[in-house]
Image: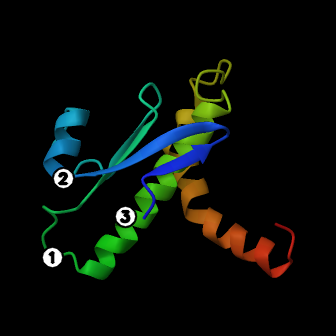
């Protein structure tokens, strides 16, 4: 997998970190976060899910892909200026529900675009 991506002309680094590192970075409990996007450092960090008990390799791959889509969505919102310019709606562009919607629905949207050959 690539370790760098271009987000609207800005290079973001992708780093995979242990569950303990993610928790420490986020000042949280282990397993509370699957990753994060640091706008200042242009870094997307994704958990390795090395402390997840009962997860199969298939479910870890699903979690990794889902978290990557989620954090990449944050990066696009950051770089488009929406993360800091959400007017009086308390930064809707950082709203986790909205970012989740994009992360979950983007593969389905992409599939329809591909089927219609409109990419």
Whether the residues at callouts 3 and 1 have beta carbons within 8 Å, the answer is no
Q: Name the residue under label 1.
A: 54
Position in image of residue 86 (x %, y %): 65, 24
Please indicate whether residue 110 sits to the left or right of residue 42 in the image.
right
Distance CA(mark 3)–CA(mark 1): 15 Å
Secondary element type, mark 3:
helix
Position in image of residue 100 (x %, y %): 52, 53
Q: In this view, does 9 lie above or below 62?
A: above
Q: Is residue 85 above or below residue 34?
A: above
The disc at residue 64 is 3
Q: Which residue lies furthest to the top in this view?
A: 88
Position in image of residue 56 (x %, y %): 23, 80
Please indicate whether residue 50 sits to the left or right of residue 118 in the image.
left
**Coloring scheme used:** rainbow
Going from N to C along the chain, the mark reached first, 3 or 1, is 1
Q: Quadrant of the C terminus?
A: bottom right
Q: Which residue corresponds to the image point at 59% horizontal and 45% vertical from the top-left?
A: 6
Q: Name the residue under label 2.
A: 18
């Amino acid at each position: 997998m690539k370790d760098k991506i271009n987000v609207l002309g800005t290079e973001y680094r992708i780093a995979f970190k242990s569950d303990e590192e993610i928790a420490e970075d986020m000042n949280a409990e282990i397993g509370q976060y699957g990753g994060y996007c640091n706008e200042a450092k242009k870094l997307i960090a994704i958990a390795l899910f090395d402390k997840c008990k009962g997860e199969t390799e298939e479910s870890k791959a699903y979690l990794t892909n889902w978290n990557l889509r989620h954090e990449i969505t944050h990066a696009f919102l950051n770089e488009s200026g929406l993360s800091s310019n959400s007017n009086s709606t308390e930064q809707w562009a950082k709203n986790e529900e909205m970012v989740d919607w994009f992360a979950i629905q983007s593969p389905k949207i992409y599939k329809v675009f591909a089927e219609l050959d409109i990419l």
